[in-house]
Image: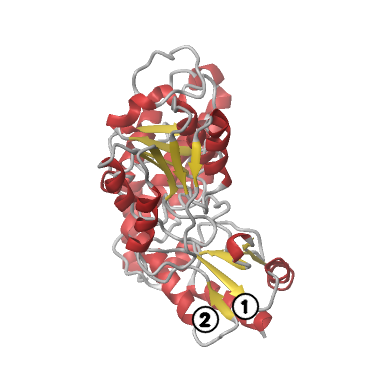
Amino acid sequence: MTNTARRSFLKRLGQGAVGSMTLPVFSTTLNDHWQTIGLHATANDSEEYWHLVKSQFNLAEGLHYFNNASLGASSTHIQQATNHFRSTLDGFPSKYMWGAWEEEKERVREKTANLFSVTTEEIALIHNTTEGMNLIARSFDLQPGDEVILADHEHASGRIPWEVWQEKKGIKLVRPELPIRPKSVAELATIYENAITPKTKIISMCHMVNTNGMILPVQEVSKMAHEKGILVAVDGAQTAGMFTINLKELGCDFYTASSHKWLFSPKGVGVFYARKESQHYLKPLMVARGHTDKSIRRLENYNTRNLPEVLGLGAAIDFHNTIGASRIHRRSFELKAYFRSKLEGNPKLIIKSPALDALSAAIQVVEIKGKDVKNVKQKLWEDYGIDCRPMKSHNLNALRLSFAIHITKKDIDYLVKALNALAA
């Protein structure tokens, strides 16, 4: 990156990106931090650029973090913004907990809505995906014999709410089996289509499964479901922030995600989308004063909550937008392709994620043939400082590897070298 490009970006941050932050007061420390970032809005997608992005994450020394699908790290700037809000709250607790930050909170809602191409009246700011899935599953007055489709790769937090709130009442949970490496979107869509019966009321599905990073056909399923009067709820924990998402185009009724994974927000913040036409189905998990509110805000009426983390989500979206959603989208698929290319020619390294970009992105799972995945994961950590997630379900026996924006091609080279060594 040239010095001219760097200076141009610093100027942009000083005039635009910093000004868009939701901070009511800017500390010198935060401004100084922004002035050190060398991420230029018009820079090409060079590795130098992504090394600068990596420099904004203070991961532990010696740690090679490929476990973003479990939990993401907040960048330094997101941490500082959130800490600023904490200090402000502790300086005048009653003022900032009840009332003084209403406008700031609404700006976070607006930024979130813009990120997903929906309206502010369709976004609630909740705690995490688990809360969102509970909110959906508990809301419906389904009758014995009614059916909910829930494929076999659903995360526990997407499955258990349906088991507890509906299955125990006599509602049937239909569990179609998904292939590990489908060849096409149509192949997956057909599985859902074949699972639908006249008794189907709701389809609950992941946007991307946490097991092997497979992207499910939400748009296609939503279209066929709505033609039959069926609602579609989506667990977006693994997609929000990884690539661009237009929820209007996706077509689902509900979408919920934890922003502390691929958006790098403070922990314990989540996003909940409900299509305007479908909001009347939903009942708040908690009620307090203000429960008669007819807007989507009734779903986040916790009275007292950790507002610095909520406002920190605004800082996380600012960080995301500074880099650029389209650039992050391209990078997710670039790293996927680079990683897969490096494994070609080694028959002992078996990729168990679908190949097509329509079916997988920045999560890839790999089996080392003949090796138990838990032992491999332990060796990677002990010998190489690599953290990742072992996946044993669905006969995977594979390492789940996450390629977040702080991962560089150099990091992938290091990972592949370690995998080859263990495979040998």
User: Does the CB distance between marks 2 and 1 fall below 8 Å?
Assistant: yes
Residue drawn at x 58%, y 53% is 70
**Element under label 2?**
helix
* Residue 298 coordinates in the image, percent (x, y): 41, 21
Q: Which mark is residue 76?
A: none
Residue 361 percent location from the top left of the image: 42, 64
Tell me if mark 2 has few (under 14), some (14-19) or many (20+) residues whose alpha carbon lies within 10 angstroms of its own: some
Residue 423 seen from this side = yes
Seen in the picture, residue 357 relative to 105 is either above or below; the reply is: below
Residue 324 appearing in the image: no
What residue is drawn where x is 32% and y is 32%?
A: 122
Mark identifier at residue 343: 2
Mark 2: which amino acid? Answer: Leu
Judged from this view, the residue extending furthest toward the bottom is 345
Quadrant for residue 256, please give it.
top left
Q: Judge by depth and name the residue closer to the eye, 50 or 340.
A: 340
Measured as percent of width and height from the top left, residue 211 is found at 54, 58
Q: Quadrant of the N terminus?
A: bottom left
Counting residues from the start of the chain, the first of labels 2 and 1 encountered is: 2
Q: Mark 1: which secondary structure? A: helix
Apparent side of residue 394 relative to residue 14 in the rendered image (left or right): right
| Above or below, 109 relative to 101 | below
Q: Split into 4 quadrants, where in the image is the C terminus? A: bottom right
Q: x, y percentage for residue 356? A: 37, 69
Label 1: how many residues lie within 10 Å, few (<14), some (14-19) or many (20+)?
Answer: some
Q: Which residue is mark 1?
A: 419
Scheme of image coloration: secondary structure
Q: Residue at x 34, y 24 (%)?
A: 280
- Using the image as rendered, state which of residue 167 and residue 2 is in the foreground: 167
Circle 1: residue type: Leu
Whole-number angstrom distance, CA of label 2 to CA of label 1 = 9 Å
